[in-house]
Image (tube, helix red, strand yellow):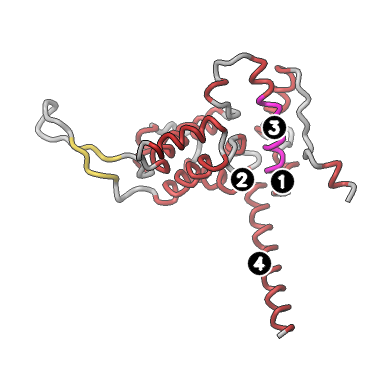
């Protein structure tokens, strides 16, 4: 009996190591790409960011957002016959939707509803209260936000701060940065994410210059972990 338990534990341990190695490899591949900017959104971890970045594809390919939403099966199809004066009618969502992209976007929406920035969580709950399917309707919004972050290699800002005072943005960046670092530390890829040419490192340097910040390029827990 004891031997069986030890065997089970050893198998579980080997499986955990394999998963850790896979997640680490995913993080290393994501770190130098624009997809790394998705990790600046609270609620989006590295694995989900990598999956969504892989499905959205090359940011240089200018895809119409409406077509991408339709491709992901997030919007109903419209059909119109008989000339421009005739009314169009909905036919439901396409069965040819890209299932992996749809799942990624819906997972992102769900995570935002649970762990996202407070403004996005409130929007998610509003959709729930109105009887919508928030995974689809919030998914469309998150697809728009994530596509922008990838194409523009941008750092996520909550809507209220887009036109807010510089002091408020400075405070937000200072609080958000440590959370981003922890995500990459947990995947053992913080050095790759903050290499000289990596998008996150370029943002770190720019934010330090623009807002007179002192954003670190090491994990917030570095000193504590080093003393173990």
- Is disc 2 in contact with disc 1, using a CB cutoff of under 8 Å? yes
Q: CA distance from mark 2 to mark 1?
A: 10 Å
Query: Quick one: SS at disc 1?
Result: loop
Q: Quadrant of residue 198?
A: top right
Instruction: Select label 1 or label 3 by which is in front.
Output: 3
Precedes in sequence: disc 1 or disc 4: 4
Q: Main secondary structure of the magenta part?
A: helix
Q: CA distance from mark 2 to mark 4?
A: 20 Å
Q: CA distance from mark 1 to mark 3?
A: 15 Å
| Residue 178 percent across, percent down from the top left | 72, 35
Closer to the camera, 211 or 53?
211
Instruction: Select label 3 or label 2 by which is in front.
Output: 3
- Is disc 4 in contact with disc 3, using a CB cutoff of under 8 Å? no
Looking at the rendering, the stretch of residues picked out in magenta corresponds to 172-183
- Is disc 2 in contact with disc 4, using a CB cutoff of under 8 Å? no
- Determine which residue is flagged by label 3: 177
Q: CA distance from mark 1 to mark 4?
A: 20 Å
- Determine which residue is flagged by label 1: 189
Say if 123 sits above or below 111 in the image: above
- Is disc 1 in contact with disc 3, using a CB cutoff of under 8 Å? no
- Determine which residue is flagged by label 2: 46
In the picture as drawn, the residue positioned furthest to the front comes out as 129
The 10 Å Cα crowd at callout 3, few under 14, some 14 to 19, many 20 or more, is: some
Q: CA distance from mark 4 to mark 3?
A: 32 Å
- Determine which residue is flagged by label 4: 15
């Amino acid at each position: 009996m004891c031997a069986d338990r030890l065997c089970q534990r050893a198998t579980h341990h080997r499986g955990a190591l394999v998963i850790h190695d896979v997640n680490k490899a995913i993080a290393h591949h994501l770190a130098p790409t624009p997809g790394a900017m998705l990790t600046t959104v609270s609620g989006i971890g590295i694995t989900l960011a990598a999956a969504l970045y892989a499905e959205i594809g090359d940011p240089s390919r200018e895809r119409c957002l409406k077509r991408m939403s339709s491709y992901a099966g997030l919007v109903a199809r419209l059909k119109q016959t008989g000339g421009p004066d005739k009314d169009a009618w909905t036919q439901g969502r396409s069965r040819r939707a890209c299932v992996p992209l749809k799942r990624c976007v819906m997972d992102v929406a769900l995570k935002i509803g649970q762990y996202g920035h407070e403004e996005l969580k409130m929007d998610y709950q509003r959709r729930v209260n109105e009887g919508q399917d928030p995974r689809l309707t919030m998914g469309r919004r998150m697809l728009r936000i994530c596509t922008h972050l990838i194409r523009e290699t941008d750092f996520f800002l909550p809507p209220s701060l887009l036109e807010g005072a510089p002091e408020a943005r400075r405070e937000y960046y200072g609080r958000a940065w440590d959370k981003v670092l922890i995500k990459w530390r947990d995947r053992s890829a913080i050095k790759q994410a903050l290499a000289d040419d990596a998008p996150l490192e370029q943002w770190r340097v720019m934010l330090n210059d623009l807002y007179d910040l002192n954003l670190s390029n090491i994990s917030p827990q570095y000193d504590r972990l080093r003393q173990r």
